[in-house]
Structure formats: C-alpha cells, structure tokens
Image (cartoon, rainbow, N blue to C red):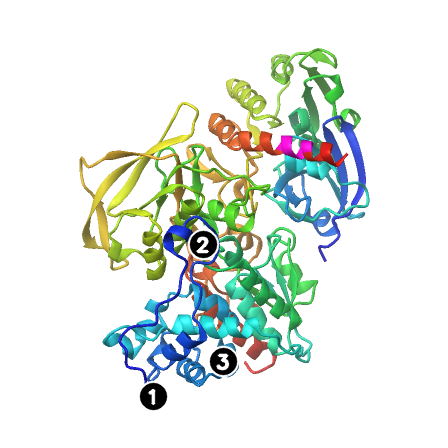
Amino acid sequence: MNSLNRILEKRELNPTVTMMKVDAPLIARKAEPGQFIILRADADGERIPLTVADYDREAGTVTIIFQIVGASTFTLNRLNEGDMIHDFVGPLGRPTEIEGLRKVAVVGGGVGCAIAYPVAKKLHEQGAVVHSVTGFRSKDLVILEDEFARVSDKVCKMSDDGSWGEKGLVTDALRELIESGEQYDEVITIGPLIMMKFVCALTKQYGIKTVASMNPIMIDGTGMCGGCRLTVGGVTKFACVDGPDFDGHEIDFDEAMARGRMYADFERHAYDEACNLLKEAK
Amino acid sequence: MPNMRLTKNPMPSQDPTVRNANFEEVALGYTEEMALDEAQRCLNCKQKFCVSGCPVRIDIPAFIHETAQGNFEAAYQIISLSSSLPAVCGRVCPQESQCEGQCIRGKKGEPVAIGRLERFVADRHNSAEHAEVSVPEKNGHKVAVIGSGPSGLTCAGDLARKGYEVTIFEALHLPGGVLVYGIPEFRLPKAIVQREIEGLKALGVKVETNVVIGRTLMIDELMEEMGFEAVFIGSGAGLPKFMNIPGENLKGVYSANEFLTRINLMKAYRPDASTPIQHGRSVAVVGGGNVAMDAARCAKRMGADVTVVYRRTEKELPARREEVEHAMEEGIRFLFLTNPVAIESNEQGWVSGIRVQKMELGEPDASGRRRPVPVEGSEEDLPMDCVIMALGTSPNPLIKSTTEGLATQRWGGIIVEEETGKTSREGVYAGGDAVTGAATVILAMGAGKTAAAAIDAKLSGNA
C-alpha cells in the first residue's frame, strides 16, 4: 500500500536546491498547503521533515523541494528518477488556514518559497488577491519564479545583492506595499527564522494578522517525541500537531532559532564526512 | 517435594561496571539448571493467586509445572494460550506488583521468580527451530489495528489466530511501538520484538508502516471504503508532559520520549548514526517511572554522570523495582524529595544547571500517595548540561480530532467499556495507553486481548 515512494521526476532548481516528484497516492489524496511529510532516504537514514511543495491528487504525486544543507539531504539528493525513497509518510501537521481570506501578502524567503508557493496557489484558486514577496540571496538561487508569477496579482522580487529584482530585504518590499495603502486580511510568511521574525515585527507595527510556518527539529512528526516544541504566546506548543503554522506575533523566534542550532556542530561534521565518503567513492 | 529455599535463583547479569558502558542486554537469563531449580519452588497451589495478578491470566502454575518437568515447549504452549509476547513480558512486566506480588511463597521469603521463568521458557522456544506455523483458515472478516505496540500486536495476534484478516497500521517506519522506540536495547533486545512481529506476519497479519491514522487515512475511510468491519485503536501514549518551569526549551532539555527515540529507534548511540544526540556530561533525569529509569540508564551508557531527581521518596518510585536496583548498581545517583523549579543556561543558550527545591511529604492526595510540598528556602543549584523530563504523556490528539463521535475523557483518553474495549463509535475499540494514559506493557496487552475477544464475539455473531 505504501511501498511506492518512487521518484518520478527530479530537477535541480539551483545548485543547492532540488525538486522531486514522488509517487505517493495516499498522501496526494489528503495533502493540503502547509502540511509536511517525513522521509528517510535509506534504511539507516535520519527522519527528515519537508513541507509539501505541491501535489496532484489525480496523478497521485507529491512534490518536495529541499535544500542540501547536511548529510541527510545530501544522501537524499543522491537518489535519482526511478529510485525509491525508503520511507515517506504524511501528510503531517495542520493545513494552512486560508478559508475566507480575500487579500493576502505571501512572503517567502529562499527555499521557504517552495512552501509559500502552494499556499499562494490555493489562495489564487479560491479567488483571493495574492501579492507575493519573494527574496533570495542572489539570482542563482532563485526558484519558482514563473510559478509565483502565475498565481500572484502582484510580485515583488528581492535579492540581497541586487542581482535579481530589487536590492533589499523582503521586509523593505512589504513595508512599501503596506505604506502605499495595500490592505491585507493576512500576511503569510515562510522562510528563514530570522526573516520571519522581522516580517512579524513589521506587521505587528501595522496590526496585520500574520501567520508564520515553522520548521523545527522533529523526529516522529505525529505528536510523540516533543522535540518540535516552541513557545507561542508564552505556552509550549508542538509544531507537528498544533502547527506548523502559528500566530507570528506570538512566536518566541529567538528561542526557536537557538533550538534550531542545537545540532549544528554534529550536522556540519556529518556533512563533511558524507562529502568525504563521496570523494573516496570516486 | 517442592524446593523450599526462601530465595529466588538470582538472575545472572552483566557486571554493573561493565554494562553501564554498553547497550547489550543486562540480564542474561536463567540456565536450564536454574530454571529447573526455580520451577520447583512453585507449590502449584489450588487457589492460583498468581493468575489473578496477571492482566492476561496466564496459567502460571501449569507452565511452571511443565518447566519443572523439563517440558519447556509444553510450558511455552501454555503461556502462548494467554500471551502473544512472552519473551517481551518476561523482561518488562512489573512482576512484583502482579503475579509475583500475589505468590504465596512471598509471604515468607521471596516469591517464585515467575517473570524469569517466563523469559527462560520463551527464549528457549525462540532459540529452537520450529515447524512452519500453519496459517489459520480465513473467516472472511477484516479488522484494522492502529498502532503496533503491545496492545495492537496482542489484538492482531489473537484475531489472526481466529482467522481474521488483520492489517496493522503503524505511523513510524518500524513496527513495535514503545517496545522499539521507548524501551532500550539493554532491557529488551530489538531482535526479540522483531521476532514477535515476524511471528504475527507468519500468521497472515499485514503490517503497513508509515501510515498515520488521522492523517494518511481516517477511521471512517478504513470502515466505509476499505472494508474493515472493526477497528482497534492502540495508538499509545502521546505528547510528553513538561513542568512549565523556566528554561524547559533551552538547548539540552529533552523529553524522555525524544531522548529515548533518538537512542532506541534512531540508534543515535552508535558512532555512525545519522541522527544526532547531545552527549551530556552531567545529566539530570526528572521523574521516577520506568521511562525515567530507561532514560537515566541510557544517558549513563552514553558516558554521562547521571542524577535522577524525584519529588517523593524512594518508596514511592513508580518504576519497576528491578530497574531502580539496576540503575543504582550502575552508579546512577538519586535525589529524592527534590523538585526542579528552573533550568539555567549559559550565554550560548545551553543548559548549565538546574535549580531544585527540597520537598517533604504532606497529606495524601487523590492518588492516595502523600503529596510532596516544597520546603521554603531550600533552593539550591546543581550544575548540569542536559536535562531529561520524564513526567508522563498526554494522549495524542490526532485520532480524536479526526474521528467524529469518538468520546474521550476531558484529559483526552478514549472512553471505553472496560469489559469489551468498545468505544462510543460502533465497531471501534480501543486499549492501551490511548485509553489509560501511560501504563504498562502488560496492561496494554490485556486490553488488546479483551478487545480482540469482543471483536470476535461481534463479528462472528455471538454478541
């Protein structure tokens, strides 16, 4: 029943970001924007949570987009079209709540745009006005440019070095939109924690409800381990069952950033080892 | 003539100073000689008090009688009539408060070592070659079991033996539930769990891993679209509890569930593991149950100096007695009548210590145990670099929130009729920690058994 998980399509979106379309009919039947899957690339692999970037209920496929940041994503990226992903489970977490929204700014940063896109698409499909603000470090790292253009009524492109769109941060563009009189029912932001922190700080000034999609460290993803906990409004919440979306004005981002770095040393070491192994294999 | 020695045959074990640095099994098991000798301590009482102490009602005097005669396979078959997981229960049951707690021999001296004998008989059976299990003739009824922990495995086994077509749905990538992610290798080798699961598969039970009921599939779909006539929910314990004290989300604070899952399921103790874990130097484990003991002993094996912090006294420790003794032998320190009030950190946001408060026992509370009350002005700081919270769990909300009409307690546990495991939903049964909150393997097995009997009665038209 669940033994498929075959990679039907693999594409390099930029040198460190890969898209995979996976045969997973059960998950494709249920997946909604904002939800995630957990996978293990091979029999000894780590459980990696990845947000669903797209799904096709008829074709029974689920698309994931991931950045190669450590040994586990490195191993995942070595799988090719036709290969099977060892374990692929989901959809997990609650879907992003977009019902009734009429005008929304979707703010994505880096590979977070892969998660922001299905939200923007669904909003567009329900007839909402979508303003997308996407930011990347530079032009080579841009993903999903055409996709965002198709589902947005307005697109603001930002890059740190000015090599794509305007030079500046997503918060610069968002402030400009708000200042120019755009009135949003909600801002939805997905990207690096530091970016989401500043987006939320900005919208708080203007009193615009903001939802941030969190991607903390987790293991089971079903409400058992408690590793994905974060503080929201002074209360401990679990991203896997209570989230991953939370009220951005209530999230303790500094704590989330610290927790996210808990295994940074281990991961750097594991990544180096994985790269060295590959060199030896060659 | 029974053997009237007052003491049990001691369990051969790895030396504490050796085993506290490895993950191999602590208790090595009886030899045949020891088992024969121990079995002769049983008086084969007419009034079988021991059986009344066993949640799955194993005919204990009968299996011990066969053991004493050297008929080990016959002994195994007697246990098998009541228990699907004898090799597991012989290792993890709290015998002192169940069968052995009722044993007449315990009135004067030590009870018969029923658990050790059960383990011997099961291991003996498992180490021998056996003829292929005959798959029971199918009766044409389909039952879904949610979760592959002790209650689910038991329910599935009992139904499969009666000819039901059983499919187990497991959320994780490996079946076994708490037997795999929770209980450590040194207490319950994973090969034993694997063997039990292979045994169920040989009976025709299907195991679908990586399926989260309440997300991937709903109970309604199982029953309405996939043709399952009954569903047993054995989804186990849920989210870990915390104390709500400052510092609980610092780097270096784990729930016991997370710590144990990293070690047991993801093998983070192995140098080549792909899942990371913090190697603490001084670790505080907060709590006094079996899970706390497991976490403490794992941390010790990872090289840490470990302190268990418990707010009541040694007498109230809820853990199985043997686990406490083992932990103490392995050099784990216990601070009783002590309760954390805050976790402190260094500049990098890592745990640097815990602030604890002394407690004293006051009036009995609702549980009948004397309530610990803080001693004013008794606070002190203990340097630590890792804290593991082992305070129990609250039920997983996934199935409850996606199954209409499934009644639950205010605290989230699924409400069932005790004699049958029936829930408020027609055809849906439940048992184990999902119903009771964190309890024991054997109680969960008992609940799986009860539900299997009720499902059989219903589907075969006898109820």
Q: Label 3: which residue?
A: B72
Q: Residue at x 70, y 27 (%)?
A: A129
Along the line of sight, the residue nearer the viewer: B313 or A90 = B313
Q: Earlier in the sequence, mark 1 or mark 2?
A: 1
Q: Where is residue A130 shown, x and y percent of the image?
A: 70, 26
| Chain part drawn in magenta | A271-276
Specify whether disc 1 shares its chain with disc 3. Answer: yes
Q: Residue at x 64, y 73 (%)?
A: B203
The amino acid on which the numbered mark 3 sits, given as a three-letter code, is: Phe
Q: Label 1: which residue?
A: B46
Q: How many numbered discs?
A: 3
Judge depth for marks 1 and 2 and give the one in front: 1
The reply to whether the magenta stretch includes residue B128 is no
* Alpha carbon distance from label 1 to label 3: 22 Å
* Alpha carbon distance from label 2 to label 3: 43 Å
The amino acid on which the numbered mark 1 sits, given as a three-letter code, is: Lys
Along the line of sight, the residue nearer the viewer: B316 or A28 = B316
Q: Earlier in the sequence, mark 1 or mark 3?
A: 1
Q: Would you say A201 lies left or right of A143 here? A: left
Specify whether disc 1 shares its chain with disc 2. Answer: yes
Q: Where is residue B240 shown, x and y percent of the image?
A: 44, 47
* Tags 2 and 3 touching, CB below 8 Å: no
Q: Label 2: which residue?
A: B412
Q: Would you say A144 lies left or right of B228 here? A: right
Q: Would you say B280 lies left or right of A40 here? A: left
Of all chains, the one bearing label 2 is B
